[in-house]
Image (cartoon, grey):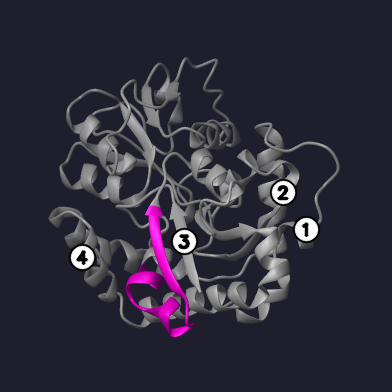
Amino acid sequence: MALKICYSDFVSNSFFPAIAAVELGFFEEEDIDAEHELIFPAPKAAEALREGDVDMIAGSAHSMLWAFPRWRGVRLLCSLSQGIFFFLVMRADAPVTADNLAGLKGMRIRSAPDVDRLLKATLRAAGIDPDKEGIEIGPPKKPVPKGTSFGVASAQALINGEIDGFWANAMATELAVREGIGKVVLDIRRGIGPQAAFNFTQPTLATHAGLVEEQPEICAAAVRAMSATLEALKEDPSLAAKVGEKLFPPKEAALIAGLIERDLPFYSTRITEEFVAGLDGYTREVGLLDGDPVPYDNIVATEFSEYWT
């Protein structure tokens, strides 16, 4: 079967396992002819899944609610890694540290559409009200060129002095830190910042409910492919470099294996009830979900959990 997978972030570690699963042949081993495509921003990617333009989406779990209110018509198949995966990077000379977020007052922070809410909620969890503090959080005034990673473009904007900081992926973070222009202020996965935000979202593989009901064997094969990919990257992180050399610009290709190696402790395809509880709390806080709680089994395709790592 042919299968089209989309994602909203490309030149980064964010949804890299889904790209690697295609490029390293793990879908092919499951007799699936898979292809991948960048659709930015995240709400647009979720809409592509709803409209049937793609079969699956590798994306932040919470972003599915932009196109599937109350999780109707969509199911999470597995995780690509555990926990919130964004970094807050500020210019190196900014008067702010992880222990002194009050220094963010009046700062200009670039964030992609959708995850601006995620940063605001994370700051509130840390005791900072971004509105009261006049912290400007939002997308760039000019659209990111088609095919360009939002995070990488944000790192360049920080280097150019156009912004004070950005909320983005590890690739953008690495580029800014290596240039000496940026410093990490929040990295929730690694204990820098409010741990209440860890389960606000995480990378997942999702599909429309119709595919789960009508062709469960395809969904099972996709989960097996993802689990095999994570195990392969754990055993040999240099496999990431092979994918990067094929698809990424030279500078980013040289960095991807190191970023993936750093993420390996979080590599698991499990979707826990603890995570879904945190996801529920976050999506209610930002207005993506309301009403009675949606049961775990109505969000997660647990029938394929036997293939999770």
**Residue 137: percent from the left, percent from the top?**
44, 24
Question: Helix, strand, or loop for circle 4?
Answer: helix
Inter-mark Cα distance, 2 to 3: 21 Å
Residue at position x 66%, y 57% in the image: 275
The boundaries of the magenta stretch are 20-37
Inter-mark Cα distance, 1 to 4: 38 Å
Task: Pick whichever, 162 or 182, lies toward us.
Answer: 162
Is 158 contained in the magenta span?
A: no
Read off the residue under disc 4. Answer: 246
Instruction: Tell which circle, 2 or 1, labels the residue nearer the N-terminal end.
Output: 2
Quadrant in the rendering for residue 263: bottom left
Task: Pick whichever, 257 or 123, lies toward us.
Answer: 257
Question: Helix, strand, or loop for circle 2?
Answer: helix
Read off the residue under disc 1. Answer: 298
Residue at position x 20%, y 65% in the image: 246
Disc on res. 111: none
- The C terminus, quarter of image: bottom right
Disc on res. 71: 2
Q: Is residue 256 visible to the viewer in this orientation of the structure?
A: yes
Instruction: Tell which circle, 3 or 4, labels the residue nearer the N-terminal end.
Output: 3
Tell whether 65 sits left or right of 93: right
**Residue 61: percent from the left, percent from the top?**
59, 51
Read off the residue under disc 3. Answer: 4
Instruction: Tell which circle, 2 or 4, labels the residue nearer the N-terminal end.
Output: 2
Label 4: few (<14), some (14–19) or many (≥20) C-alpha neighbours in 10 Å: few
Instruction: Tell which circle, 1 or 4, labels the residue nearer the N-terminal end.
Output: 4
